[in-house]
Image: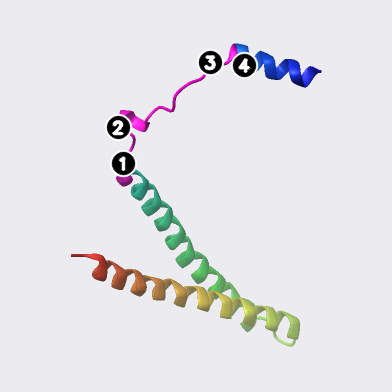
Amino acid sequence: MPLLFVALAMLLIAQPVAAQPVGGGGGSSGDFLDILNRAWEVVYDSMQFIGLAVLGLGLVVYFTARNNSNRSETGMKLAVGGGVLTVAYFGMAAIIAVLEYVATP
């Protein structure tokens, strides 16, 4: 019964409203592309710095492991992961450059 009362109150109080265009003109695809470009730059820059930081951390852990095989293995895994992320960063730069070249008239 309370749920029915709330639904009836919503119908009486809330007025139906038509969808309003964004910015008066319905928005443009340029606005959305700008947002996507900024998000891409954040991800791309984060990928570079995180990859280099993990690579450096992994090398430090690996070379300071001495006789501890677990620590040595952890350092090796971190170094390989950071290296792969750094290579992926430069690989993505090349792929994006090729795609931009192909897409440009």
State whether residue 11 is above or below residue 76.
above
* Disc 2 secondary structure class: loop
User: In terms of sequence position, does the residue under pointer 2 or pointer 3 come before the other?
Assistant: 3
Q: Mark 4 points at which residue?
A: 11
Q: Of the residues shown, which amino acid type is indicated by label 2? A: Gly
- Residue 104 pos. (x, y %): 21, 65
Q: Of the residues shown, which amino acid type is indicated by label 1? A: Ser
* Disc 1 secondary structure class: loop
Which residue sits at x=51%, y=19%?
Answer: 16
Q: Which mark is residue 25?
A: 2
Which residue sits at x=18%, y=65%?
Answer: 105
Structural distance between the alpha carbons of marks 4 and 3: 8 Å
Structural distance between the alpha carbons of marks 2 and 3: 24 Å
Q: Name the residue under label 3.
A: 15
Camera-nearest residue between 54 and 32:
32
* Residue 39 is a magenta residue: no
* Label 1–label 2 contact, CB within 8 A: yes
Q: Which stretch did the figure color magenta? A: 13-30
* Disc 4 secondary structure class: helix
Which residue sits at x=57%, y=76%?
Answer: 81
- Residue 5 pos. (x, y %): 74, 15
Q: Name the residue under label 1.
A: 28
